[in-house]
Image: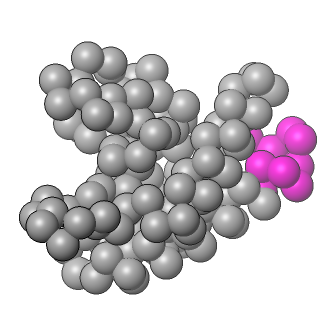
Amino acid sequence: MEGDKQNLLSALKAELEFLEKGGYRHTSPFSVWPRFIFEDSPTCLNFYAPDRPHPCSECVLIDLVPLDRRDAKIPCRHIPLNEAGETLDNVYRWATAEETETIVANWLKATIRKLEGSPTEECSLPIAAAQRAQSAGGRF
């Protein structure tokens, strides 16, 4: 379990660095496709692999996805990002790219702090927040 936690922590730190260095911003004014958080970064097992040869169940982020969303086509879009249980799937519907990046950066920083702060703390903290929000009728 400790190795899994370290792998997750390393992936989240790499993701934050990628985000902060503008990895999701278009590098060309001729790019027409949006970039998607997690799936269009080196964190994704299928990065630059349009045929998606690796199942998402092998991804280090899968433990952050609620159990009932792990079979979704793109499970990482269902990771709860805040206490209200909002996910990328929700945020993509209303936020600008800049707002989305800010929300994800804040989540990444908070999750990294939690993982670094308590060696015995489970990696399911975001899931617990989503379950509380869902039972309270929050957006999910």
Q: Quadrant of residue 37?
A: bottom left
Q: Where 71 falls versus 94 (above or below)?
A: above
Instruction: Judge by depth and name the residue closer to the eye, 132 or 9.
Output: 9
Residue sitting at x 69%, y 26%: 4
Residue sitting at x 54%, y 65%: 21
Q: Where 42 falls versus 112 (above or below)?
A: above
Instruction: Judge from the rendering whether residue 91 lies leftward or rightward of residue 57; answer left or right.
Output: left
Here the colouring is one colour
Q: Position of residue 44 (x, y in %)?
A: 41, 36
Q: Position of residue 56 (x, y in %)?
A: 36, 27
The image shows a total of numbered marks equal to 0
Q: Is residue 118 magenta?
A: yes
Residue sitting at x 69%, y 66%: 110
Q: Quadrant of residue 83?
A: bottom right
Q: Where 73 falls versus 99 (above or below)?
A: above
Instruction: Judge from the rendering whether residue 58 lies leftward or rightward of residue 97; answer left or right.
Output: right
* Residue stretch rendered in magenta on the structure: 114-122
Does residue 126 appear in this view? no
Instruction: Judge from the rendering whether residue 3 lies leftward or rightward of residue 20; answer left or right.
Output: right
Q: Quadrant of residue 23?
A: bottom left
Point out the image quarter for the C terminus: bottom left
Point out the image quarter for the N terminus: top right
Does residue 11 appear in this view? yes
Residue lying furthest top:
53
Q: Is residue 131 magenta?
A: no
Q: Position of residue 98 (x, y in %)?
A: 38, 81
